[in-house]
Image: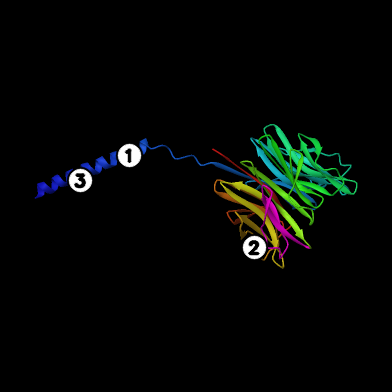
Amino acid sequence: MKNLLKMNNHLLGLLVLCAISFTSCSKDDDPAPPKEKQTDVYVVGTVFEGTHIAKLWKNGVATNLSDGSTEVYPTDVFVSGADVYVSGYDYNGTTATAKLWKNGVATNLTNGTKSASAQSIYVSGTDVYVAGYEVSGIQTVAKLWKNGVATNLTDGSKYAQANSVYVSGSNVYVSGHDGDVATIWKNGVSINLTDGSNPASATSVYVEDDVVYATGYKRNGSVAQAIFWRNGLATNLSDGANNAFGNAVYVSDGNTYVVGREFNGTRYVIKLWKNGVVTNVSDELKNSFAGSVFAVGGNVYVTGSEGDVATVWKNGVATKLSNSIRSAAGAIFVTQTN
């Protein structure tokens, strides 16, 4: 019996040794796990420090874009390769000058004789597109700058504004309004989204697979209603009972995201509509304003201000970008590299 036990133990030991050897060889032969992607989150906004200071946060660390001598407001951010572009405007107490920053170095898009703002930026290859507007008499002209050269999208006969720009292939799309009409310009040709019977504006445009998405609002009397357009077909995001505005649209992995704000009777709450289904982003007890939305790698980022504090939400979890109660986070751009 002892010999049998010894033999069984010997066999068991061999089996264990073989199992260990086999497992070790299998692990050695397995491919290395994929390298985790480096994610960088860029956000632009303002912090009041005597004047409004333009800020660029990279992964939560702030860099000043202005020195405090004037009021400066960044409006959008775009990252292309190693270059970081920011659009915005600089108000000196009399007029506002449309500006573009590349890697922190500012360039004026207008000469300051008429107030103007750069509202949105898109970089395609070596071309830099900026959408915005400039005052013309008692009206404003919607404008598009390509590499610093301006083109008027409207004739100056009505109050008009270009809010957002997106480049898809050889086509350049701009959203905004011409008078009371929410409008998209495709290569400079206007496409009306509304009939002008009520004031309306398209605040953001996004293009994927030749489908043109936009968001904005339309006023019904004194109440603004958040709207989403897909190839010009409108869908109401809010019920029209309280003021609501669509602020930015983003499309990722077949999902459509719209961020905006809605008045709940006492204060504004940031809302996120995913494929038309709404969720609250900000605390309903704190007055909040929406900035933008970006989705990548299965994560959804939203920016804005909550209780007048610049904040970014990742999958609904809030992170404050500033301790100042007079700060706001606007546009966001997220990059992922191996």
Q: Position of residue 54 (x, y in %)?
A: 75, 47
Q: From the viewer's perspective, is residue 18 above or below residue 302?
A: above
Asked if residue 55 shows in the view, the reply is: yes
Mark 2 and mark 1 in contact? Answer it, CB < 8 Å: no
Q: Is residue 62 magenta?
A: no
In what element is the residue under mark 1? helix
Q: Earlier in the sequence, mark 3 or mark 1?
A: 3
Q: Left or right of 14: which side holds 328?
A: right
- Residue flagged by tag 3: what amino acid is it? Leu
Q: Position of residue 118 (x, y in %)?
A: 78, 43
Mark 3 and mark 2 in contact? Answer it, CB < 8 Å: no
Q: Position of residue 239 (x, y in %)?
A: 68, 63
The span picked out in magenta is 222-248
Alpha-carbon span between mark 2 and mark 1: 52 Å
Q: What is the basis of the colouring in this image?
A: rainbow
Residue underneath mark 2:
283
In what element is the residue under mark 3? helix
Residue underneath mark 3:
12
Residue 244 position by quadrant: bottom right
**Mark 2 surroundings within 10 Å by alpha-carbon count, few (fewer than 14), some (14 through 19), many (20 or more):** some
* Viewer-proximal residue among 270 and 136: 136
Residue underneath mark 1:
24
- Residue flagged by tag 1: what amino acid is it? Ser
Q: Earlier in the sequence, mark 2 or mark 1?
A: 1
**Mark 3 surroundings within 10 Å by alpha-carbon count, few (fewer than 14), some (14 through 19), many (20 or more):** few
Which image quadrant: the C terminus?
top right
The dominant secondary structure in magenta is strand
Q: Earlier in the sequence, mark 3 or mark 2?
A: 3
* Viewer-proximal residue among 163 and 224: 224
